Image (cartoon, rainbow, N blue to C red):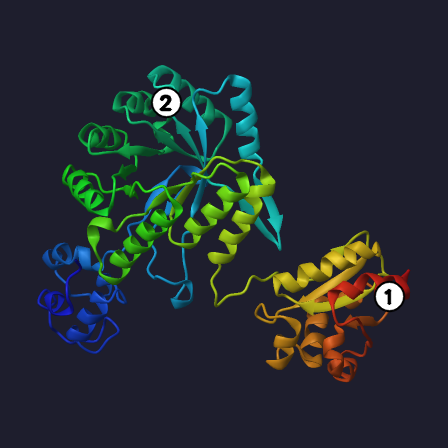
Amino acid sequence: MGLTGLEIFKQLPKKNCGECGVPTCLAFAMALAAGKASLETCPYVTEAAKEALGSASAPPIKLVKVGYGDHVVELGDETVMFRHDKTFYHPTGVAFEVEDILDDAALTEKLEKINGLEFDRVGLHYTVDMIAVKNASGNADTFAKVVNKVAESSGLALILMSDDSDAMAKALETVTTKKPLVYAATADNYERMTEVAKKYEAPLAVKADGLDELEDLVKKVVALGHKDLVLDPGSRKTVDVLADLTQMRRLTIKKKFRPLGYPVMAFSTEEKPMDEMLQAQVYVSKYASLVVLKTVEKEYVMPLLTWRQNLYTDPQKPIQVESKIYEVGAVTPESPVYITTNFSLTYYSVEGEVEGSKIPSYIIPIDTDGTSVLTAWAAGKFGGDRIAEVMKELGIEEKVNHRNVIIPGYVAVIAAKLKEESGWNVIVGPRESAGITGFAKGNFA
């Protein structure tokens, strides 16, 4: 359990200087106990107190990094139960299982599919994170050989899956610099597996059957000197996994229960691809730090990545595009000019319809802090004066030889002000982006 505010207070200098940002040491101790302050903000705390209070000032879920270079996957370090309380910080790692019994052609084909799992949507680039190599053959040499091929064929972070500590050590020899996740230490092998993970400085997964056994096993592994852990409670049925993940999150966030304060991983078990993705969606939502899948077809994986991106977007910061002049198609000085907001969904809806019209055009998204047209207008962020100011700043008049600008039909009321401030002729376009294609063909074709 975490320390109470009074227990923390006893270790503080009791100067009541206020330099930490709160007026008294007692108030600071209470904030520290609640996870709302950092021990480093106290300039007078002693080294002995820092050591004693280390657990109180540590995040409730430890940050564990897997991988190397540009492919480091950060797991854990979450601070809230619910996204709207603050935000979620480290998106669930998505890994794909590859067995070492695949022949060369099948292995190459699967790796190509995994490497190809990336796409762009509303200005964001979506990718997967990891490849989990499973020692299904039971042979150490085969396992090491496949691990090495996977590492050479993909830059994604690795998970090495084997109960055999000797096979694990042999595989780690070839990929130690890639900092793979070692899976897994169990009640039967934890001493040797922990020794191997420590030797190669690799994060270690700990697996047990149930939370009570997991707690005991984590304590044993930590006592051996290894703390970069990822936990697997051992459950595999969706309802049981959900219950375990939720209980672990509650214990770590609400109760600051340190033995379970590590990232958590889950495995899909459904055979049908759609069912597997629905199962994974449950785990991404509540509260897996890492999920291991089998299906690698893009049409099934894309919805999961989209859901993950939406879940791990700061709810107080809508997805936005840069406010600048965008060119759709081979624009000319005669091309029409559209105005919209910089909310990503709004902008890309407009862009898609403009592109569909086959009429090259300019689009200027006004910075409205990522709000939609009507919301921005209601908040005073999408008025004629503001739009005229942005048009002038961006220099759109230097790109076209006409003075016609198109605004969304829902804000026709701003037309007069925009004309007055900019000197441009204001054309009121369709209310919905879906009407842009017909509007453009009827007016500019």
Relative side of 299 to 249, left or right: right
Residue 305 position in % (x across, y down):
53, 48
Relative side of 250 to 348, left or right: left
Relative side of 77 to 413, left or right: left
**The disc labelled 1 sits on which kind of residue?**
Asn
Image quadrant of residue 373? Answer: bottom right
- Who's the residue at 46% across and 22% down the image? 149
Residue 291 visible in rendering: yes
- Who's the residue at 68% across and 59% down the image? 348
Quadrant where the C terminus sits is bottom right
Q: Are marks 1 and 2 in contact (CB under 8 Å)?
A: no
Quadrant where the N terminus sits is bottom left
Q: Which numbered disc, 1 or 2, marks the residue that appears first in the sequence? A: 2
User: In front: mark 1 or mark 2?
Assistant: 2
120 is higher (above) or lower (below) than 159: below
What residue is pinned by disc 1? 401
Residue 419 is marked as none
What residue is pinned by disc 2? 174
Q: For numbered disc 2, what is the local secondary structure? A: helix
Residue 398 visible in rendering: no
